[in-house]
Image (tube, grey):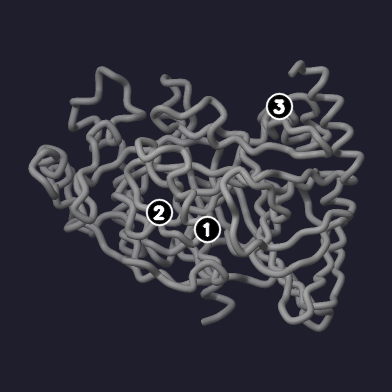
Amino acid sequence: MSQQSIEIMTRRALDGGNGILRLAPTWVPRSFLHPGRRLKLHPDDLYALGAHRGGIDERWFASTTPADNEGAPADEGLSYVVFAEGRFSLRDAVEACGAEIIGQEMWDTYQRWPVYSKFFDNMGPIPHHLHQSTEQVAALGRLGKPEGYYFPPQLNYTGNNFPYTFFGLEPGTTKADVRRCLQRWDEGDNGILDLSKAYRLRPGTGWLVGPRLLHAPGSLVTYEPQWGSDVFGMYQSLVEGRAVPRDLLVKDVPADKQDDLDYLVDLIDWEGNLDPNFKDNHYLEPIPVADSAAEGYVDRWVVYGKADGQQWFSAKELTVAPGVKATIKDNGAYGLIVVQGRGQIGDLPVHSPTMIRFGEMTEDELFVTESAARSGVIVASLAEHEPLVVLRYFGPDVNPDAPEVGDCKRRNP
């Protein structure tokens, strides 16, 4: 499809939705993980991309970032706009009509939608790993990745096998300790978790994790706003009895450094990982945006704060009581997913499905442009006995009024 055709279709879709775009579900497999079966994807479709690709354990939202999976098609991970009979990627739409979709300032700064979000859903834990900083992967033409976590209660009716996450390294851990773990890669369990601490995960809470921080996410379904990158390095050699290929340790490492254990150890942010107050500096609880409960709706910050001194992204959870309409104004564009209930957002009907077949269209995901967000979007909850609950995430520096990490503790001592 030509750039001109995409631009025409994008503008038709924007006009038809009054600045709101309907998005199709985007499913992503991970060959080294075991799906947790809570993303509403039909059980027969968990391996719809082939067993060799792995089970589908992720759904990506408003993504213009491709998934970096071996054997993946070029558009894996990209979200698609659906309008009338047309279908085209959100990445192409942003390239064609950038400022009209994400706002002039963000377009001028990044020339793309620089963030995305996902649900990841696994039966057990993910290997202890980190995401490199941009400086560490710039020579490879890649970007670093901070990320945030929120555990939506609607999807976490069971915790699966290990609802605990290891974060960082225990104070007193040395570079030599981690180096020995990497030396033992082919001996089975390399013992990296012996150097870390696990925290119990609770639905309705979250964490903020910057680049270069080791973490082994547990088995709760996680809503994960993050920077538009898929770089990582796995530092754990065995998880739940399954070997982790060493290729996943050095996936985003220059070829001449892949056997340099000292280089791999130095990818770690040692000060950040050894922080004795790690939880205080990374743990999040929801904070209301305003006192609106009497009006029948509550908007709450669920992902907020700065990593390395910058607000890379933020996220809110909106709950609208049955029969209530609320006009919601925001500072910038956002991706949106409905996790409970039925209603209408702008002129578009929405509902949270019970079961989704692979390739099937849904009415639970939207992208709201900056102009629509600033003007205000009417959100109506139409189910008789349950609220409409919506998660939405924003790009960098969009919400200077967002809380800082630790504010939840100060407000709820």
Mark 1 vs mark 2, CA separation in Å: 9 Å
Name the mark on residue 39: 1
Q: Earlier in the sequence, mark 2 or mark 3?
A: 2
Question: Is 407 in front, or is 224?
Answer: 224
Q: Earlier in the sequence, mark 1 or mark 3?
A: 1
Tell us which disc is closer to us: 2 or 3: 2
Quickly name the residue at label 3. Answer: 92
Q: In the picture shown, does residue 293 fall above or below 66?
A: below
Question: Which residue is rendered at x = 61% and y = 64% of the image?
Answer: 354
Q: Classify mark 3: residues with Cα within 10 Å, few (<14), some (14-19) or many (20+).
A: many
Q: Amino acid at mark 3?
A: Asp
Q: Are marks 1 and 2 in contact (CB under 8 Å)?
A: yes
Give the structural element (helix, strand or loop) at label 2.
loop
Question: Which residue is rendered at x = 31% and y = 59% of the image?
Answer: 166
Q: Amino acid at mark 2?
A: Pro
Name the mark on residue 58: none
Quickly name the residue at label 2. Answer: 35
Question: Which residue is rendered at x = 29% and y = 65% of the image?
Answer: 198
Q: Are marks 2 and 3 in contact (CB under 8 Å)?
A: no
Q: Classify mark 1: residues with Cα within 10 Å, few (<14), some (14-19) or many (20+).
A: many
Q: Amino acid at mark 1?
A: Leu
Mark 2 vs mark 3, CA separation in Å: 30 Å
Q: Which quarter of the rendering shows the N terminus? A: top right
